Image (cartoon, rainbow, N blue to C red):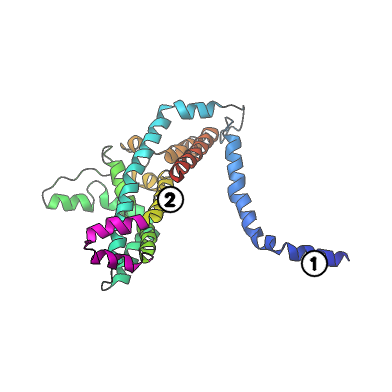
């Protein structure tokens, strides 16, 4: 009887067994780290000293500290530069690659590859070697008699240079736009052509309105990604650079506080604040 009951319960709940590996991974790698960060954010936990008191001073410092406010401004500036550029570049290339041209599959693959490789440390090191002072790019400028700026050491150029390099990774957005373009009925363009609408009018009156859900999706994902910028700045700018303070994002500040200075409590407060900020901006975008 007990055996039959066990088999019946197992049969009725077999789905839980299939999602059990995911649940374990979620609890270990997502839920527990989040709960720990939330707990530590209300303490003065130090990596080497432990916890001596519970306090809300971390959050007070996050909203009043000049370095945090400056990092927040830099983060928004980076997002303001990167997101529109990536959207425009991805939509432009997707629109071109939607036409039946020779070798279109090759070009689609070629434009998508940077999204796979662009986030790696190796590619970041390559970019740094190309754009560093007296590197290949500056040498090329000098050969034609032009003066190139210090892309990653000049505070006025560092963040903009990072933004341009991140824009290079528009392949994922391009694929989303390309899929959406394939879903636009050809009959609409034919009817518009019969009515005398040119390519420009068709693009703004047919293509853009029908792509609005995809544009919204890409913009939300791009904003979330840009607010978490860290890797390129860490590899290309790094500690001690003259441009470090002018290109220090919120996540980079979190890394410095939590892992270099060992102030885990303050770092956790920064992480929780960034999470709330991303949730708020995403909610505003969905309204």
> Which quarter of the figure has residue 170?
bottom left
Q: Identify the residue shown where x is 40% and y is 51%.
A: 216
Residue 8 visible in the shown view: yes
Q: Residues within 10 Å of mark 1 (few under 14, many from 20)?
A: few
First to last magenta residue range: 183-210
Q: On screen, 170 above or below 193? A: above
Outermost residue, left direction? 145
Q: Identify the residue shown where x is 64% and y is 55%.
A: 23
Q: On screen, 199 above or below 153? A: below
162 or 284, nearer to the observer: 284
Q: Is residue 9 left or right of residue 199?
A: right
Q: Is residue 57 left or right of residue 204?
A: right
Residue 7's label in the rendered image is 1
Cα–Cα span, label 1 and label 2:
44 Å
Q: Which of disc 2 and disc 1 is earlier in sequence? A: 1
Residue holding disc 2: 221
16 or 20, nearer to the observer: 16
């Amino acid at each position: 009887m007990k055996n039959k009951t066990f088999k019946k319960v197992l049969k009725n709940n077999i789905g839980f067994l299939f999602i059990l590996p995911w649940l374990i991974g979620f609890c270990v790698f997502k839920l527990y780290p989040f709960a720990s960060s939330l707990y530590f954010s209300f303490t003065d936990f130090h990596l080497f000293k432990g916890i001596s008191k519970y306090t809300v001073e971390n959050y007070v410092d996050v909203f009043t500290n000049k370095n945090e406010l400056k990092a927040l401004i830099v983060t928004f500036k980076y997002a303001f530069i990167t997101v529109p550029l990536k959207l425009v570049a991805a939509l432009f290339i997707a629109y071109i690659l939607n036409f039946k041209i020779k070798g279109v599959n090759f070009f689609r693959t070629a434009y998508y590859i940077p999204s796979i490789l662009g986030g790696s440390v190796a590619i970041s090191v390559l970019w740094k070697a190309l754009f560093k002072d007296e590197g290949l790019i500056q040498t090329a400028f000098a050969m034609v008699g032009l003066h190139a700026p210090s892309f990653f050491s000049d505070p006025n150029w560092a963040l903009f240079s990072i933004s341009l390099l991140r824009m290079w990774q528009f392949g994922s957005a391009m694929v989303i736009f390309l899929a959406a373009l394939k879903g636009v009925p050809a009959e609409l363009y034919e009817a518009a052509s019969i009515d005398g609408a040119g390519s420009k009018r068709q693009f703004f009156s047919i293509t853009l309105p029908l792509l609005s859900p995809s544009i919204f999706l890409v913009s939300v994902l791009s904003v979330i990604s840009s607010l978490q910028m860290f890797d390129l700045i860490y590899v290309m700018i790094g500690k001690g650079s003259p441009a470090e303070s002018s290109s220090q994002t919120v996540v980079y500040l979190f890394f410095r506080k939590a892992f270099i200075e060992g102030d885990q409590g303050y770092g956790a407060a920064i992480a929780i604040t960034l999470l709330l900020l991303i949730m708020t901006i995403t909610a505003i975008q969905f309204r």
